[in-house]
Image (cartoon, grey):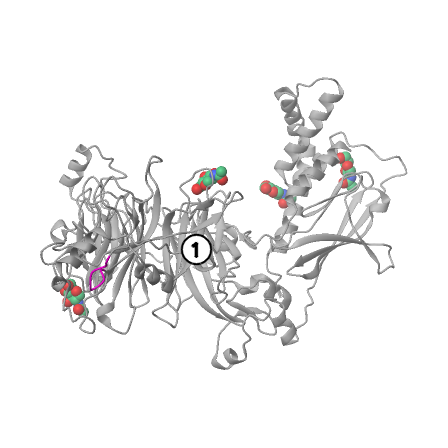
Amino acid sequence: MLALFCLISLAAPLTYAWRPSQPRLHFQHSELVRSGRLMSLSVPAGDLNSLLPGEDGRRLYIGMKDHLLSASLDDITQTPRKIYWPASPDRIQNCIMAGKTLQTDCANFLRVLELYNQTHLYACGTGAFNPRCAFIPTNLFLRAEEQMLQYEDTESGKGKCPYDPHQRTATAIIDGELYAGISSDFLSHDTAFIRSLGERHVIRTEQYDTTWLQGAEFVHVAAMSESDNEEDDKVYVFFTERAQEAEGAAGKVLYSRVARVCKNDIGGQRSLVHKWSTFQKARIVCSVPGPDGIQTHFDKLQDIFIQRGKDKKNPLIYGLFTTTSNVLNGSAVCVYRMQDIIRAFKGNFLHREGQQYKWTEYTGRVPYPRPGTCPSSTYGGFKSTREYPDEVIFFSRTHLLMQEVVHPLGGHPFLIRVGVPYKLTRLLVDRVEAVDGQYDVLFIGTDSGLVLKAIHLPKASGQNQEITLEQLQVFKNKSPITAMTLSKKKQWLFAGSAEGVVQLGLFHCDLYGQACAECCLARDPYCTWDGHSCSPYMPTARRRNIRQVNDDGNPLNQCVRQGAGLQVDAEEKTQVVALGNSTYLECLPKSHHATVTWFKDIGENSLEQHKVRSGEQLVVIDRGILIPRAELNHGGIYHCQLEEHGFRWTAVTVRLIVWSPAPHPTLVSSQPWYQDVMALINHGKLERHCKEFSQRHNNKESGNHKHNKQDRKRADRHRHRGGGEKEKGRGRKNRSRMQSSAQRLPRSA
Ligand SMILES: *[C@@H]1O[C@H](CO)[C@@H](O)[C@H](O)[C@H]1NC(C)=O
Ligand SMILES: *[C@@H]1O[C@H](CO)[C@@H](O)[C@H](O)[C@H]1NC(C)=O
Ligand SMILES: *[C@@H]1O[C@H](CO)[C@@H](O)[C@H](O)[C@H]1NC(C)=O
Ligand SMILES: *[C@@H]1O[C@H](CO)[C@@H](O)[C@H](O)[C@H]1NC(C)=O
């Protein structure tokens, strides 16, 4: 009886409620491999920083430690071509002498990998704290023997690549020039945003001026057009830095930022020579109000994805953030509109009178042309930033920070993960034409080797609802995902970690089930019910026209419209138990969004059913019904009913036969009843809790309040004794596992 209580009290937190942030389906690494959705290239990468699809759509370039790889985009498992690019031996010596570590510092960690032109890549490595860069002809990978890049084939990487591989770096090649957010010195004190490589003179942020940048960790660089006038084109850079305007007695505060410069900025004439004269920055916020009204900030930017839709000038910007607080262990995705970022740059400036003053809004006169404006023949007639009046240049130097803060769409994160044993690391977005409209599908990598797949309806401004469709364990040893890329054409996702590179199918429609309702409930924009099965959706002009955009949000309407019916076939099972023995009726919904309810037929020939509730002789838990001691009246037909999105169906029907072995009274099992059941369920935590609960109770009864280690040891010994019992238990465990895995697999046609 007490043990029953124990189970009931445990069952409560295990009960499923529909929680949007809970991934609907979970896939283990082995399942993904078995179903052919996941392929792996194991390379002892140690450090894998970039995955870059080639322009021809056939090769995937991989930047690692001392190596540059070219793998097949169609089949990652094919042996990749390699270029060996080590740091020079004397640099390695110097690096070690400077007190650095051979494995983690004194090698050539590739940190920049870009497509330069149709025939060449541009790549840079840290070169054992002596950064080097090189143009790499892609046909070098075609040679059969492994290639080696000599020191003479490379050029100085200063201002293009960090010295220290642990410094976060963001780069982009735009019109043949390299824009790099890096720490540009040996000690990583000078964080800078630098343009180099083209015909023009190198240009950068002011050096060692903390109002420009302070301890910046760069995440992303992208070119953006704001108008049809090319002279107005800008380059944006996203990063996290120490926030000058917020720091005080409390010490270091981190803010995430978006900054921008004009593409045609060449610096000032008398001041800001070879420095950006249009550099401006604004804060981007991703936070949630706590119960006390105080905002919890996801302050550290981890990744940015720019989703350029039809309106090229107004992309959606997806930002992935984590908290620096170790207590919270949280991550979030916030979505920003380009208009909102531009508005912040049109707003007022912050300034301060001097080092000891506070930052305040600047309300004085702003010189003309307004700092941050790109030189243009259409307004003002300035041919270049060198022609700007000194007053403008001087103002620009000291008014870099905007007062307005950029808030996310809807004012709050679109996805939050808090209190989970992982943090989010990388983000990709695929815009998908689905049967019921357009979706943005997010693929998010974690530091535990998972990929999460979530959907976002880009049109529903303000009403962000996140649905995480899948959680996929893509790296066997749970290595943090450090790079991701997607081939839209081939419908593959590539993810990299210290274990190597994996190639993952974006979807696997036929795994959702054989009924229309199961296909629709999956809500996977890549999949649709084609009248016979759940299959990939191919948008065609005709079908696109009849599409109804997002209906009323009920995914089942599609089946109703198609007249497909909502019938889902139930699995049927028969279970036999001896009178007095324990048994367990199991129901494992694939979907973690489904709730489970059990019903039992009232009589053999009755259509009436009653809901099964926990009582003294039977316990209903999250995935099944426990019967500690079977009685004759436990026999009958049980139905496991699932409910998801308001739709109910029977997943499993179990006929339970209680069998009376002999006329003799029932034998009472020598071991505690719950161990019998444990053999059936495989729920280690439950057992420990129950055992402890029983022991606590027993101890109390005998007046002994010390339920100590010895009791536990004795119990363990008891459990591990007796080979016969153990064998029997294992046999049953295997059977129940087989049943459950059969349910998880697609029911083959
Ligand atoms: C690409 O750039 C490299 C390095 O500057 C140059 O040698 C090569 O000719 C260029 N290729 C094309 C097709 O422009
Ligand atoms: C926080 O996340 C890390 C992985 O990033 C994990 O190892 C740790 O257990 C998590 N802590 C909590 C309290 O969830
Ligand atoms: C019922 O339990 C007893 C004791 O654990 C065991 O010996 C017996 O084989 C079980 N009967 C069946 C049919 O499983
Ligand atoms: C049960 O599983 C174990 C490993 O988990 C295996 O060694 C054993 O052969 C299995 N027994 C049956 C009857 O399948």
Q: Measuring 51% from the left and 66% from the top, which residue is drawn there?
A: 525
x, y (%) of residue 250? 36, 35
Question: Is 212 placed above or below 388 here?
Answer: above
- Identified at 54% across, 80% down, the residue is 546
Q: Residue furthest bottom?
A: 542
* Residue 641: % across, % down: 71, 56
Task: Report the side of 677 relative to 190 (left or right).
Answer: right
**Quarter of the rendering occupied by the N terminus:** top right
Q: Is residue 740 above or below residue 410?
A: above
Report the amino acid beneath label 1. Answer: Cys
Whether residue 661 is visible:
yes
The overriding secondary structure of the stretch rendered in magenta is: loop
Which residue was labeled with disc 1? Answer: 334
Looking at the rendering, which quadrant does residue 442 occupy?
bottom left
Q: So how many labels did they put on this image? A: 1
User: Which quadrant does ligand 4 occupy?
Assistant: top right
Residue in the image at 84% along x and 61% along y: 607
Is 590 included in the stretch rendered in magenta? Answer: no
Left or right: where 301 falls relative to 543: left
Farthest right residue in view: 663
Q: Which percent across, then down, holds residue 492?
A: 42, 62
Expressed as whole percent of the image width and height from the top left, the position of residue 636 reads 82, 51
- Give the extent of the magenta segment: 365-371
